[in-house]
Image (spheres, helix red, strand yellow):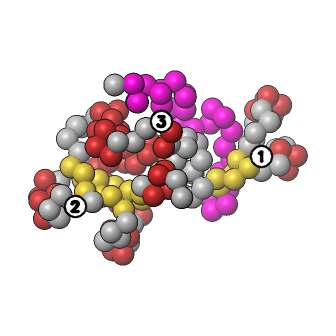
Amino acid sequence: MTRQQEIRFVAESALGKLAKWLRILGFDTIYEPEFSDRSFRDPGRIRLTRTLKTYRQLGGKSIIFITSDHYPEQIKQVIRELGITLQDVKPFSRCIRCNDPIHRVDKKSLPGKVPDYIWETHDTFLTCRRCHRIYWPGSHIAHSNQRIKQLFDD
Ligand SMILES: [Zn+2]
């Protein structure tokens, strides 16, 4: 098991953009509107909170109190506190909508399902088996590899 698979998160509702970004980086991240009481208490997940009261109640165990209002800073804080490196991340491996891993799909099955110019100019397509959204390099929001690298530069 790689480090990347071990680190899992549960994010509170104020941290939607951070949650989305953690999924872009490949981390299993559930986000408040979706999580059940059970996943909330899952000790295997690191809780991300903006609520000082919650942080104090849990005594700092498996919880990170996010200090910034701005998501790029929030991501950097998580990376810093957990010592995550570029080698730990697996960008674009997870559906940003469902959090499920996405899988390679045969291009031949896709005409009509993606815009023609995308089909003609790309060879790699992935799909989420839960929501059936189709991904290709460049389809993720804020997708540039350059931007991901910048998160680890400081
Ligand atoms: Zn999905």
- Sequence-wise, the earlier of marks 2 and 3 is 2
Tell us which disc is closer to us: 1 or 3.
3
- Label drawn at residue 152: none
* Badge 3: residue crowd in 10 Å (few <14, some 14–19, many ≥20): some
- Sequence-wise, the earlier of marks 2 and 1 is 2
Question: What amino acid is at disc 3?
Answer: Leu
The residue located at (57%, 50%) in the rendering is: 94
Toward which corner of the image does residue 67 lie, by quadrant? top left
Residue 103 shown left or right of residue 79 in the figure: right
Query: Circle 1 sits in a helix, a strand or a loop, which is it?
Result: loop
The residue located at (22%, 37%) in the rendering is: 68
Find the distance from the CA under tag 2 to the CA under tag 1.
Answer: 45 Å
User: Does 55 lie within the magenta span?
Assistant: no
User: Which residue bears the numbered disc 3?
Assistant: 86
State the image coordinates of residue 134 (x, y, percent, origin top left). 68, 47
* Residue, far bottom: 38
Q: Are the residues at dot 2 and dot 3 in contact (C-beta closer than 8 Å)? A: no
Find the distance from the CA under tag 2 to the CA under tag 3.
Answer: 25 Å
Query: Circle 3 sits in a helix, a strand or a loop, which is it?
Result: helix
